[in-house]
Amino acid sequence: MPSQRTILVFGGTGQTGRHLTDLALAAGHHVRVLARTPAKAGPPRAGLDVRRGSVTDDLDLDGLLDGVDSVVSLLGDVQAQRTAMVNTAFVRRLVPAMRRTGVRRFLYQAGALSAPPHGRLTPALWAIRNTVARSYDGQHRDNEAVMRYLADEAMDLQWMVHRAGIGSDGPSKGVLERTEGTPGIGTFRDCADYDLRLLDDPTAVHTTSLSAYRKRAGRTAGRTSAGV
Ligand SMILES: NC(=O)c1ccc[n+]([C@@H]2O[C@H](COP(=O)([O-])OP(=O)(O)OC[C@H]3O[C@@H](n4cnc5c(N)ncnc54)[C@H](OP(=O)(O)O)[C@@H]3O)[C@@H](O)[C@H]2O)c1
């Protein structure tokens, strides 16, 4: 991967996406964002290229992917995903376009309460999903279908999934790291920072791991129970 690259971001106007865009621009990358409402991407900035559109449109995906090094999906529409697999339908169109244009790397952010492909959530995470997080069930089912599609039909691409547990839009609480254990409750900013590091991590390819805060001497930053 070149140190300065062009990242195509879907969901760049969202809670994680705004931070990821800011952090990527600050790191010197070019960021191309597809936005339903371009004004939500903030003021024009050097390196930022905002294109209007919805992932449900008949998009010129090859044009969007032109010159791109890697793709990030931070998509979510809780309301729409209650009745339609919006992200799955889109990723099923995106992946062939990535193959056509030779773009190999793809990071998809799902949730800590989205079960890994052909795997299960722990009883504790299922309990949270079926109670306090019940209204997000459609989003998790959509995320799970995306992960199954990637695992079953897109192993030729260098994809990675972050099953994020997010609890607040507050300031940084520390550094998130990959874990197969108990997820941490991250901030949107810390998840965006983690996503950018994951994108460059060759050991993350074909993983669907959770994240948790790196332990400081004698303690763990942030709480370590499950977030949404
Ligand atoms: N929020 C949480 O607490 C949480 C926790 C854990 C994991 N996650 C996961 O992280 C991912 C992103 O979550 P988030 O909370 O950062 O997202 P979010 O704040 O809900 O933002 C979603 C983004 O997707 C965009 N989007 C939705 N439908 C679109 C469409 N049809 N065309 C183009 N763009 C569209 C939105 O654009 P607009 O600005 O136009 O709406 C927005 O930029 C999701 O997979 C979610 O499951 C979220």
Image (tube, helix red, strand yellow):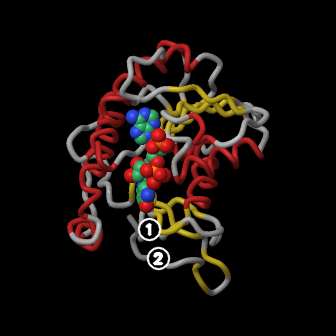
Near-viewer residue (47 or 93): 47
Q: Which residue is mark 1?
A: 183
Queried on whether the Cβ of the residue with tag 1 lies below 8 angstroms from ligand 1, the answer reads no
Q: Which residue is mark 2?
A: 224
Which residue is found at the position 35% from the left and 37% from the top?
87
128 w.r.t. 217: above or below: above
Which residue is found at the position 22% from the left and 71% from the top?
131
Q: Residues within 10 Å of mark 2 (few under 14, many from 20)?
A: some
Q: What is the three-letter code of the residue carrying label 1? A: Pro
Which residue is found at the position 51% from the left and 48% from the top?
14
141 w.r.t. 183: above or below: above
Q: Earlier in the sequence, mark 1 or mark 2?
A: 1
Query: In this view of the protein, can residue 161 be seen by the observer?
Result: no
Left or right relative to 184: residue 218: right
Percent coordinates x, y for residue 42 in the rendering: 66, 43
Percent coordinates x, y for residue 92 in the rendering: 34, 26
Q: Secondary structure at mark 1?
A: loop
In this view, which residue lies farthest toward the bottom?
Answer: 218
Left or right relative to 83: residue 176: right
Percent coordinates x, y for residue 94 in the rendering: 42, 24
